[in-house]
Amino acid sequence: MLDRTATEEIANDARARGNVLRLAAAQALTGANSAVIFATGSIVGATLAPSISLATVPLSMYVLGLAAGTLPTGAISRVYGRRTAFIIGTFCGMLTGVLAALAVLYAHFWLFCGATFLGGLYGAVAQSYRFAAADGASAAFRPKALSWVMAGGVFAGVLGPQLVQWTMDIWPPYLFAFSFVVQAFVALIAMAVLAGVDAPKPAPSDLHGGRPLLEIARQPRFIAAALCGVIAYPMMNLVMTSAPLAMKMCGLTVSDSNFGIQWHIVAMYGPSFFTGSLIARFGAPTIVALGLVLEAAAAGIGLSGITAMHFWATLIVLGVGWNFAFIGASALVLETHRPQERNKVQAFNDFLVFGMMAIGSFSSGQLLAHYGWSMVNMVVFPPVLLGLAVLSFASFARRRAKLRAVDEIPDPGA
């Protein structure tokens, strides 16, 4: 029996490794799409919006799309399989590029917001790539599969901003219009890559099995994982979405902001090559805590100056902190559910993360416009302290439960 179990785990890990390459490539292509939106969204928004306070609304619409797309992605994946959800997502990505280009050409602010909302739906599907890589894999391989897929974002960090840099002036005076046309083409390539992912339709027995979602969500481990994700991603997004416009307000150039966003995205995904190994060695809670501390450190750098170097350092440290905190929190989520529960639990977790991110994102433009870049950074500190406290409590509760279980084991010599 043990030999058969080991053989099955080896076979499942081999299948997972085959999927990792395609999913990592798709992560790079999808990340390039989001990089285009984040590099241009607030600048295009400031150009098209009736008020400067609405400049970051297109980015907020992207985040709203992320939140709105998480639960439908889980439902589609559960009934029809992950691959179907992936194809639908890439179709939304193609529409994003086409509609955004038209919005720039015709100076239509709300059409641009609709385009970025569709980009958020595409991004919501992409968030499930990391969990799809872990489907069926052994417990030892799951953190590595998850982090290796996220590593595809390194290429997104190079491709996305450079795509903007190379194409933003091709259709003068329509800044960025051609960038969005190329963005649609990149989504089409991603569709072709994802068509080959080995993600069969779930078995009928998986559609109705498992515990109620409320029972799963009440676990201290899940509460800590979800809360840390809710803090790590929205706080990173708050600073990142404000940075390009803040740099412009401080007299820096579009090239400066493109450079900052590029290296921010590289910092977000670059550590993924070893984050899984760090989680396996030190445990997910430790890595999550390190990530949250780094996000706070990034905010501290942002408060210390407004030169290009200060902005770049803020964005880079912020990216590394997000990587550790978000991947670590995702690994914690994998520890809280059974295989037949995965789609609903993972979708619910992402809904909480991106729902809160949407709320925070709508406030970023108001914070920057009315209170300045310093206030954007100061907002980071209280949530980080809360996350560290809850994470410590959940880890303490887990250790206590293990000790209680050991004490309850009968002594065979008694």
Image (spheres, rainbow, N blue to C red):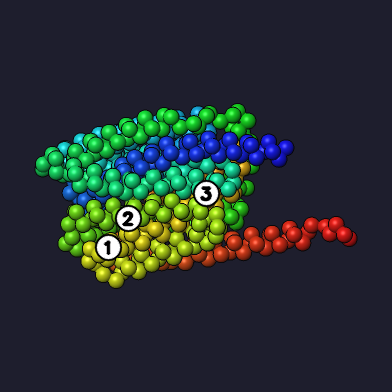
Q: At 47% from the left edge and 36% from the top edge, which residue is drawn?
A: 19
Q: At 32% from the left edge and 59% from the top edge, which residue is drawn?
A: 315
Q: Nearer the viewer, residue 348 or 52?
A: 348
Q: Earlier in the sequence, mark 2 or mark 1?
A: 2
Q: At 19% from the left edge and 40% from the top edge, which residue is drawn?
A: 177
Farthest bottom residue? 304
Q: At 60% from the left edge and 56% from the top edge, which residue is drawn?
A: 220
- Residue 252 location in percent, x, y? 18, 60
Q: Earlier in the sequence, mark 3 or mark 1?
A: 3
Note whether residue 325 is visible: yes
Tell me the crowding category of disc 3: few under 14, some 14 to 19, or many 20 or more residues within 10 angstroms, Cα based. many
> Which SS class for mark 3?
helix
> Which SS class for mark 1?
helix
Q: Which mark is residue 121?
A: none
Q: Which mark is residue 311?
A: 1
Total number of numbered labels?
3
Tag 3: amino acid = Pro
Q: Are marks 3 and 2 in contact (CB under 8 Å)?
A: no
Distance from Cα at disc 2 to Cα at disc 1: 10 Å
Q: Quadrant of the N terminus?
A: top right
In the rendered image, the vertical position of residue 61 relative to residue 292, given as above or below:
above
- Which quarter of the figure has residue 24? top left
Q: Which residue is mark 3?
A: 143
- Which quarter of the figure has residue 106? top left
Tag 1: amino acid = Phe
- Residue 319 location in percent, x, y? 37, 57
Q: Which residue is mark 2?
A: 264
Distance from Cα at disc 3 to Cα at disc 2: 23 Å
Distance from Cα at disc 3 to Cα at disc 1: 31 Å
